Amino acid sequence: MAGAKSVRQVKRTCANCGAGFRPKSGRQIYCKDVECTRKRKYRYWRKYIEGWKKRNPTYWEQYLRRWRRENPSYFRDWRRKHPSYFRDWYRRNRERLRRKRAAARRS
């Protein structure tokens, strides 16, 4: 193998910022810049999560259903403990729905 270059000798461009860098392994496509590292980790995480969601499509539905069954009075109790928040939310929601209905009538 005379003349073959090692991985460290080959210069690559970063998939995020486009800067040139020397990879530490044959699979490295991002440089060591903080933003590029963040992007690499984010892309890996998104890929993992999307795969997980495909394998477990009803997980959250089942989880929430079970949690609500185990905590039937949670929301009722919370509203009772926080009356001003609930009252303000209720008023804002009524106003929002009133505006929405009025806009629908106009169009």
Image (cartoon, rainbow, N blue to C red):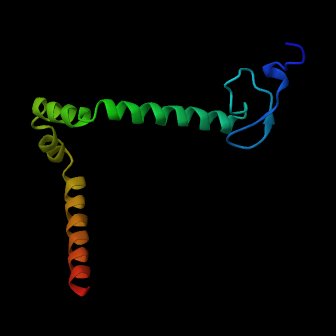
Please provide percent x and percent y for residue 4.
85, 18
> Which quadrant would residue 28 be assigned to in this image?
top right
Which quarter shows the C terminus? bottom left
In the rendered image of this protein, does residue 4 appear above or below residue 21? above
- Numbered disc total: 0
Q: Residue at x 54, y 36 (%)?
A: 42
- Describe residue 53's horizontal placement relative to residue 13 as left or right: left
Q: Residue at x 25, y 76 (%)?
A: 99
In the rendered image of this protein, does residue 42 appear above or below residue 84? above
- Describe residue 52's horizontal placement relative to residue 103 as left or right: right
In the rendered image of this protein, does residue 105 appear above or below residue 42? below
Front one among 87 and 46: 46
- Describe residue 93's horizontal placement relative to residue 80 as left or right: right
The furthest residue to the top: 1
> Which quadrant would residue 24 be assigned to in this image?
top right
Q: Residue at x 21, y 47 (%)?
A: 82
Q: Residue at x 90, y 18 (%)?
A: 3
Front one among 58 and 4: 4
The furthest residue to the bottom: 106
Front one among 89 and 101: 101
The furthest residue to the right: 3
Please provide percent x and percent y for residue 62.
19, 33
Please provide percent x and percent y for residue 76.
12, 44
Which quarter shows the N terminus? top right
- Describe residue 103's horizontal placement relative to residue 70 as left or right: right
Please provide percent x and percent y for residue 36.
67, 37
